[in-house]
Amino acid sequence: MTRRETLKCIHEPFGDAFYYGPERMSERFENDEEERTRAGFSDSTYQTILDRFEKEGAEGKRLFIKDMAYYLIPPDRRSISIAPSLSRIERGVGTNGTEQYLAKYRTNAENDDSQHTNQLGQGAKISNPSVIPGEILEKFHFTFLIRHPRSSIPSYYRCTVPPLDKHTGFYNFMPSEAGYEELRRLFDYLRSLGEIGPHIAGQTEYQPGYREAAEPAGKAQICVIDADDLLDRPNEIIQAFCESVGLHYDPAMLVWDTEEDLRQARQDFAKWKGFHEDALASSSLKPRQHKKKVKTKDEEDAEWRETFGEEAAKVIRETVDANISDYEYLKQFAMRF
């Protein structure tokens, strides 16, 4: 957001279609038409979001889109079909036929023939896990930000219970919104397409399954950033990130202390009230004075019980444990210094 002269930032746009629009996949607001309308995104589809990118990109700035992989992938491993707005609907289908198509899509009753199957270097077949056609995904330059579930899950849980839930509008915790499995599936699919890799940003090694070779022309490095590393070494991480994605690095990127910076941040974060208060209260990114202490499971459980109660602590523990393997898988690709 501090590079406004060259970058246009778009904050979690696919959440509009995932939660609120006619192609919505989330059950969070499924029975709350009033909230979907109030949010202002009840007509948002995956196509209208892509149209927005086209319009914003026409201004000549490079787009920087921060989003969640799980907004692109049916929850709970439901069957996959390409979003209706991105599929060719048979000519002559009337309103009723279109509604039936959307209903079938929302329940993900069957697979779509437009799925792509490719090969990883290790020979594993990977199908497109998302509702976005592969030829559209190929247009993006992907990087991945990860955070250990022991930190992210209780933090997210806090946003779905009082008093924060009145600000976020999220009144219950849904483990499917953790997003680690979806991020891993998208990551592996992009690897299978050859859209990322084989070189790993911030590492000298190549990804598993590949021999050392020249970087494929026009393809992106694997760029994975762990949030704890970013907080411990922000200058090195951001500089390496910029080198990986082709941006000029300037230490001033890590400072946002003007009134215009704050105004822009408030505007960009307004859609997701209550989730970004810590960021809005900050003015720079500096190295932590002390690395975060890793607590034992018993210490974590005790802290969660004290903060959220016995039953909530159990749900948090189950969700954390369910996502650690996907986090650790992605962690092996993270930048190292």
Image (spheres, rainbow, N blue to C red):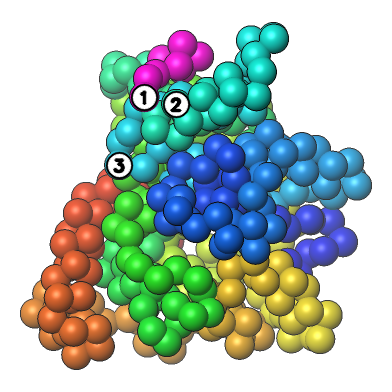
- For disc 1, the marked residue is 109
State if disc 2 and disc 1 touch (CB < 8 Å): yes
Residue 231 place in picture, x, y as percent: 47, 74
User: Can you say which quadrant of the picture contains the N terminus?
Assistant: bottom right
Taking depth in this image into account, of 260 and 86 the one nearest to the observer is: 86
- The residue that appears at 51% across and 24% down in the rendered structure is 100
- For disc 2, the marked residue is 104
- Most frequent secondary structure within the magenta stretch: loop
Question: Helix, strand or loop at disc 1?
Answer: loop
Give the mark nearer the N terminus: 1 vs 2.
2
Spatial separation of the CA atoms under disc 1 and disc 2: 6 Å
194 w.r.t. 59: above or below: above
Which residues are drawn in magenta? 109-117
Lateral position of residue 294 relative to residue 211, left or right: left
Question: Helix, strand or loop at disc 3?
Answer: helix
Lateral position of residue 141 relative to residue 146, left or right: right
Residue 156 place in picture, x, y as percent: 38, 70
Residue 102 place in picture, x, y as percent: 53, 29
Taking depth in this image into account, of 8 and 288 the one nearest to the observer is: 8
Q: Which mark is residue 287?
A: none
Spatial separation of the CA atoms under disc 1 and disc 3: 13 Å
- For disc 3, the marked residue is 76
User: Can you say which quadrant of the picture contains the C terminus?
Assistant: bottom left
33 w.r.t. 309: above or below: above
> What amino acid is labelled 2 in the image?
Lys
